């Protein structure tokens, strides 16, 4: 089932901040205090990130990605993703959400995330063909450890850009200050 394969790739999304090596703040800007709070990607930005992770137009995603920085804790995840794909005259949908939790520190233009953990919670998967819908439970919840690392950020006012170093075709993710 194609959505199941795509959901398996959520582990990649969830660990995209598991940066190995060290980065410099050369391309970053903004004070560490600018990071504090909740940041949410638009639907369009979320789709851009998902397409970069799984190229080829295999699915359409619904939901949003977010980041939260509070009290030295970093959280990155999704508000609940729905991935849809068409196979001939059938439509398939898979549901999941993921979140990565880790301690963080920052200095001007450079975000350092320490080792943490990432969880993917799968929801039901369904397929519809000829007006009939079949639904099955998703795989069990999976939690894995994530290594730490550093990456540049740019923060100004209500816009945050964070470099995603493990996704060469993506470069930066842009988020706006707002409720998760």
Image (tube, rainbow, N blue to C red):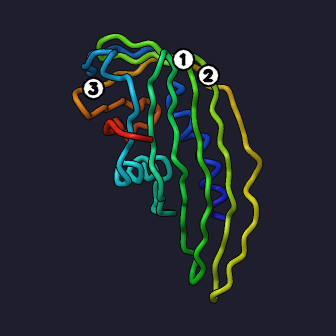
In depth, the one of 1 and 119 nearer the eye is 119
Report how far apart the C-alphas of labels 1 and 2 lie in the structure.
7 Å
Query: Crowding near pointer 2: few (<14 within 10 Å), some, many (20+)?
Result: many
Q: Residue at x 35, y 16 (%)?
A: 110
Residue at 64% in and 79% down: 128
Left or right, 176 with respect to 69, comes to left
The reply to whether callout 3 and callout 1 are in contact (CB within 8 Å) is: no
Task: Point out the tag, 3 or 1, that comes first from the N-terminus.
Answer: 1
Read off the residue under disc 2.
116
Secondary element under disc 1, as helix, strand or loop, is: strand
Q: Split into 4 quadrants, where in the image is the C terminus?
A: top left
Viewer can see residue 149: no
Residue 78, given in percent of the width and then of the height, sits at 51, 44
State yes or no: discs 3 and 2 in contact (Cβ < 8 Å): no
**Residue on which the image places disc 3:** 155
Q: Is residue 61 above or below residue 68?
A: below
Please tell me whether residue 145 is drawn above or below residue 5 in the rendered image.
above
Q: Is residue 12 above or below residue 128?
A: above
Residue 103 - label: 1
């Amino acid at each position: 089932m194609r959505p199941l394969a795509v959901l398996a790739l959520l582990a990649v999304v969830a660990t995209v901040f598991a940066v190995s090596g060290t980065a410099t703040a050369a391309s970053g800007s903004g004070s560490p205090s600018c990071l504090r709070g909740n940041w949410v990607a638009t639907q369009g930005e979320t789709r851009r990130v998902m397409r970069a992770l799984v190229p080829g137009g295999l699915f359409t995603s619904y939901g949003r990605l977010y980041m939260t920085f509070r009290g030295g804790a970093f959280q990155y995840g999704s508000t609940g993703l729905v991935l849809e794909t068409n196979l001939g005259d059938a439509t398939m949908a898979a549901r999941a959400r993921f979140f990565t939790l880790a301690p963080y520190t920052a200095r001007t233009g450079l975000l350092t995330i320490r080792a943490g953990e990432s969880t993917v919670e799968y929801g039901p998967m369904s397929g519809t063909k000829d007006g009939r819908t079949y639904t099955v439970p998703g795989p069990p919840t999976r939690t894995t450890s994530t290594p730490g690392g550093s990456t540049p950020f740019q923060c100004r006012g209500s816009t945050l850009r964070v470099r995603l170093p493990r996704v060469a075709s993506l470069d930066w993710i842009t988020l706006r200050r707002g409720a998760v």
